[in-house]
Image: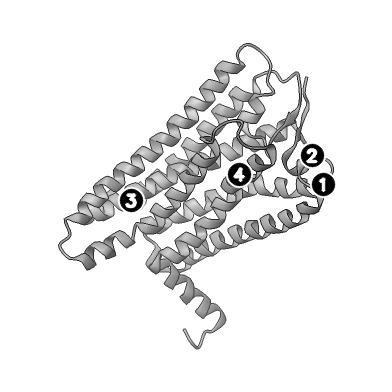
Amino acid sequence: MVSEFILLGFSTFPPHLLPAFFLLYLLMYLFTLMGNLIIMATVWNEHSLHTPMYLFLCALSTSEILLTVTLTPRMLVDMLSTRHTIAFVACASQMFFSFTFGFTHSFLLTVMGYDRYVAISHPLWYNVLMSTHTCARLVSWSWAGGSVIGMMVTLIVFRLTFCGSNVIHHFGCHVLSLLKLACGKETSSVTLGVILVCVTVLMGCLFLIILSYVFIVAAILRIPSAEGRHKTFSTCVSHLTVVIVHYGFASIIYLKPKGSHSLDSNTLMATTYTVFTPFLSPIIFSLRNKELKNAIKKSFQRKFNPLSS
């Protein structure tokens, strides 16, 4: 019986490249944490941003920080370490938290799409439909949904028997890489079930986001002036860009043809979703959202140049 796993990760890379990769991913990791913390602090301090859209953004930043903390530090340590083992329980914990925060992130993106739909299509009813109570309930449901899926998948996978190789061809406890190591007749059915659950939930979220934007575009086209249409659509640009990046990188990784890439290239492609996507998210929201960008500037002016503010 397997009591620990070996994370292959970056151990197949030439040793002289590892310090460069470590420094690059460390800087991106620190910037991700700093960017999301700045967004959360700005929303907390600026009363003008105490609206549902920015409260959802704070919840999204929280899930992004937690997802990054779950995966990236372990990957960075293993890059410069000669021992790449992870205990059975630690592997199960990492899978649970990565699924929980990852699916919570997808649910929150869906909720933010619904928020934009209500704001643009039903502006007079917005304060009623998106009250503080409703926002808190939507965020709670998102976290609860992510936790349920994370617990369900983790329990199903770790009930299997692991009796052969304990080498995971990944830098983390990736579910599909782990299922390849399981023994027993039920492994294939469990693998199919996990794939169906993940694909169904993610595609369901994407469908609801697309549906929201169909109604949003229809409402924008009814606005008579070009300036009004542009101003209204600009409130959706940052969210839409993050959705495209989030699902775009996920599609590149999980829908790529099998057998056409080396182990090293698969590892690098996996880091785009684990490290690069969270790195881009605070940049997109800070640069593409004019109101948030101005609020961050004002916060820094008050902090470092009180007389100017």
Q: Position of residue 164 (x, y in %)?
A: 76, 20
Give the CA distance from mark 4 to mark 2. Answer: 20 Å
Q: Residue at x 25, y 51 (%)?
A: 217
Q: Residues within 10 Å of mark 4 (few under 14, many from 20)?
A: some
Which quarter of the picture shows residue 206? top left
Give the CA distance from mark 1 to mark 4. Answer: 21 Å
Amino acid type, residue under disc 2 in the picture? His
Camera-nearest residue between 267 and 135: 267
Q: Residue at x 39, y 68 (%)?
A: 290
Rendered view: 189 above or below 10 = above
Q: Position of residue 135 (x, y in %)?
A: 37, 49
Amino acid type, residue under disc 4 in the picture? Met
The residue indicated by pointer 1 is: 81
Mark closest to the chain's N terminus, 2 or 3: 2
Which quarter of the picture shows residue 25? bottom right
The residue indicated by pointer 2 is: 84
Rendered view: 160 above or below 143 = above
Are discs 1 and 4 less than 8 Å apart at CB? Answer: no
Mark closest to the chain's N terminus, 1 or 4: 1
Amino acid type, residue under disc 3 in the picture? Asp
Q: Secondary structure at mark 2?
A: loop
Left or right placement of residue 125 versus residue 255 in this view: left
The residue indicated by pointer 3 is: 115
